[in-house]
Image (cartoon, grey):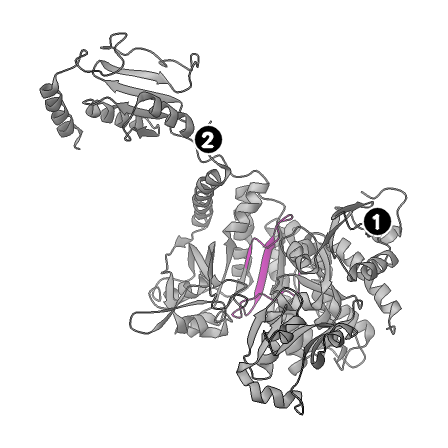
């Protein structure tokens, strides 16, 4: 039950049985934390050492790697979670995607170095299904190239994708791009955009059924903040 | 106490729990008149893709010896439907069928492992009610699912009810059709509320308030009180036509839009009559994964679990694919999830109990040991026969690890009971007592000690074998 002195009474008052939210560690956390605070929820805190954070009003935060947020929610360890749309695209999940939080803007894109005098469509035509693509997002990559009528060789790496073209492991990479600085530093150019990416709020389906009111309150409060901060409407 | 590693103990218990659960469910299903059918694990590939179920992508394919393509059954309803249409065509309707069987689907991350096409099996138990259309049949399967859980001791479940026709009517009334409707249905199936709202932005007939009302209707479960308000109680009359349809200047009253609402209202009021209204919520936006549903659909969940316990719905078009058009409705429990729910609430009885007796024989006394074990089993005890050979110490150690309390040694001088636990006191009447014919100090068989000679022993053994033969 909610106690007396809480931040943003109305959102928290509707949480009776406790809500666990999995949040992504790393670059997304400060922006997401700000959103939560403006929505009347307690700040998660940025203690890197703490992975499980209890807050007043029955809120628990789990700080996890973005890729693991979906797993926590899917398995019911967390009722709600925040992670990038790119992660959701990789997992065939039974989770409900509730809200676009409109933070963490970036895009999933194809990047690489083209041979001199050739443009990307020509390069694709030349390589066809012999194209080698290194990525952390094999599902989205296969799906994108399938929509182009291609079945390239997809090499799944867990990091440092920019190296792959340099050492001849792959022709191009599919990776998240924000400012493009990392690409430029590694001599790569952005060749095609696959999808714009933002942070999303997801929910476990069973939690959604049993904690519907609390989740609706949190979602509604976040939606108001997101809409208010954006173009409005 | 039996001693096992945690992993091993879990294996024994899991198997026992599955058998117990299947038996309990079979008991409940049978008490409603359902009869069991068994279907083969493999099925023709064409049957999997019949009726556009969407299972083709998830099914595990096999190559038959003659080059034909088979599938491991990804679903129990498909083979049951085929049997109902074919072998059971002449049986009186409605047919009430239940089943217990594993279904096989491709592992979720098949994409990620090159060449990885691993199959995952899930145990299911469920029912099909074939040949009865209408809300009473739907209410029966819903109520049977609920009653099965109540019989197991689960009472905090929730049933979310949707309806394919109702959803269609809601969208039509909101002016959502064509490509937009497909986008909305896909978003609902993917549980993507973001895509849903984005799709509805393009809906021509909806203003802001109408869009919000529609989204709320499609994404929020409505508890019973709300449902009664929406459906106007028993039947769907004026209230149904007016309440849930988002009002907007360009959206008029939709003629004949009551079919889905009327069906749902009737089903829900029947469930209320059965006393189940506290467990039911209406979820008009519920879209189940299988493509063969044509009417009511539902999912059952328990708090604290990650996934639903099971679900089902009406699938009136499926049997036509197998040559005999008939209405049908049913549901299936995912036994893994159900066992999880029961275990979490401590509702699984203790099933793996060690045998009460271990009977060992000295050389030459196998017949006596055998007879003793049989007699004890006839009295209802579980008895193990010592077969490994070896010393009394080894036998006792086995008994301790196995959790057997009472060890009987049949020797030439009769039988005596050896306490399984060293230094254990009186464990009960008869424990440690000397049986008639036994002389103290002559427990162990030893050469020439009160025993028959080799020749006699063999003869005795021969007699024992003849006696032992049933």
> Residue B132, relative to residue B376: is it above or below?
below
Q: Dot 1: what SS?
A: helix
Q: Position of residue B432 (x, y in %)?
A: 35, 13
Find the magenta span and give its range.
Answer: B283-311
Quadrant location of the C terminus of chain B?
top left
Closest to the observer, B383 or B23: B383
Lateral position of residue B284 relative to residue B293, left or right: right
Q: Position of residue B28 (x, y in %)?
A: 47, 46
Chain letter of mark 2 equals: B
Dominant SS of magenta comes to loop
Residue B467, by quadrant, is: top left
Q: CA distance from mark 1 to mark 2?
A: 49 Å
Residue B3 tag number: 2
Closest to the observer, A1 or B148: A1
Q: Position of residue B235 (x, y in %)?
A: 65, 63
Q: Are marks 1 and 2 on the same chain?
A: no
Q: Residues within 10 Å of mark 1 (few under 14, many from 20)?
A: some
Q: Residues within 10 Å of mark 2 (few under 14, many from 20)?
A: few
Residue occupied by mark 1: A13
């Amino acid at each position: 039950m909610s106690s007396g002195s809480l931040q943003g009474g109305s959102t928290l008052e509707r949480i009776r049985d406790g809500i666990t939210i999995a949040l992504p560690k790393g670059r997304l956390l400060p922006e997401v934390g700000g959103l939560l605070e403006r929505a009347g929820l307690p700040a998660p805190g940025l203690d890197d050492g703490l992975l499980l954070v209890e807050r007043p009003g029955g809120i628990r935060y789990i700080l996890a790697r973005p890729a693991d947020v979906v797993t926590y929610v899917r398995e019911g360890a967390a009722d709600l979670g925040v992670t990038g749309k790119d992660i959701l695209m990789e997992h065939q999940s039974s989770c409900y995607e509730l809200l676009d939080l409109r933070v963490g803007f970036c895009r999933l894109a194809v990047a690489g170095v083209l041979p001199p005098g050739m443009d990307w469509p020509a390069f694709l035509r030349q390589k066809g299904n012999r194209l080698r693509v290194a990525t952390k997002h094999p599902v989205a990559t296969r799906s994108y190239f399938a929509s182009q009528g291609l079945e390239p060789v997809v090499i799944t790496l867990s990091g440092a994708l920019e190296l792959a073209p340099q050492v001849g492991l792959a022709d191009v990479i599919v990776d998240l791009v924000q400012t493009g600085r990392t690409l430029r530093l590694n001599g790569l150019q952005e060749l095609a955009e696959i999808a714009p990416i933002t942070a999303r709020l997801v929910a476990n389906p069973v939690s959604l059924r049993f904690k519907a009111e609390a989740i609706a309150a949190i979602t509604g409060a976040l939606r108001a903040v997101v809409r208010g901060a954006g173009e409005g409407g | 106490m039996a001693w096992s590693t945690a992993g091993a103990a879990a294996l024994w218990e899991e198997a026992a729990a599955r058998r117990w659960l299947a038996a309990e469910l079979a008991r409940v299903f049978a008490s409603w008149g359902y009869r069991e059918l068994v279907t083969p694990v493999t099925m023709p590939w064409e049957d999997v893709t019949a009726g556009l179920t969407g299972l083709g992508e998830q099914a595990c394919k096999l190559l038959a010896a003659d080059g034909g393509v088979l599938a491991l059954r990804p679903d129990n309803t498909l083979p049951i439907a085929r049997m109902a249409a074919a072998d059971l065509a002449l049986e009186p309707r409605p047919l009430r069928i239940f089943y217990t069987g594993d279904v096989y689907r491709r592992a979720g991350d098949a994409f990620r492992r090159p060449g990885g096409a691993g199959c995952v099996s899930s145990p299911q138990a469920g029912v099909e009610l074939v040949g009865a259309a209408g809300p009473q049949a739907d209410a029966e399967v819903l109520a049977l699912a609920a009653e099965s859980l109540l019989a197991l001791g689960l009472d905090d479940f929730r049933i979310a009810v949707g309806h394919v026709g109702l959803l269609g009517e809601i969208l039509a009334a909101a002016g959502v059709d064509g490509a937009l409707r497909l986008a909305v249905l896909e978003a609902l199936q993917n549980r993507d509320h973001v895509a849903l709202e984005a799709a509805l932005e393009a809906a021509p007939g909806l203003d802001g308030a109408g869009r919000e009302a529609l989204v709320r209707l499609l994404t929020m479960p409505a508890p019973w009180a709300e449902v009664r308000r929406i459906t106007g109680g028993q039947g769907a009359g004026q209230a149904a036509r007016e309440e849930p349809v988002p009002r907007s200047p360009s959206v008029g009253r939709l003629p004949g839009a009551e079919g889905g609402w009327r069906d749902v209202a009737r089903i829900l009021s029947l469930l209320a009559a059965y006393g189940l209204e506290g467990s039911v919520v209406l979820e008009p936006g519920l879209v189940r994964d299988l493509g063969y549903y044509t009417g009511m659909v539902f999912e059952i969940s328990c708090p604290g679990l990650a996934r639903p316990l099971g679900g089902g719905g009406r699938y009136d078009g499926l049997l036509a694919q197998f040559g005999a058009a008939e209405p049908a409705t049913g549901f299936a429990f995912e036994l893994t999830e159900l066992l999880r729910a029961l275990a979490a609430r401590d509702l699984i009885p203790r099933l793996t109990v060690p045998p009460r007796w271990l009977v060992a024989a000295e050389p030459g006394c196998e017949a006596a040991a055998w007879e003793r074990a049989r007699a004890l089993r006839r009295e209802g005890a579980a008895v193990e026969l010592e077969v490994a050979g070896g010393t009394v110490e080894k036998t006792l150690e086995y008994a301790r690890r196995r959790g057997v309390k009472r060890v009987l040694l049949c020797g030439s001088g009769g039988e005596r009971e050896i306490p399984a636990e060293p230094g254990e006191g009186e464990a009960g009447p008869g424990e440690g007592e000397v049986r008639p014919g036994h002389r103290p100090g002559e427990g162990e068989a030893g050469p020439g000690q009160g025993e028959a000679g080799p020749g006699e022993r063999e003869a005795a053994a021969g007699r024992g074998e003849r006696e032992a033969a049933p």
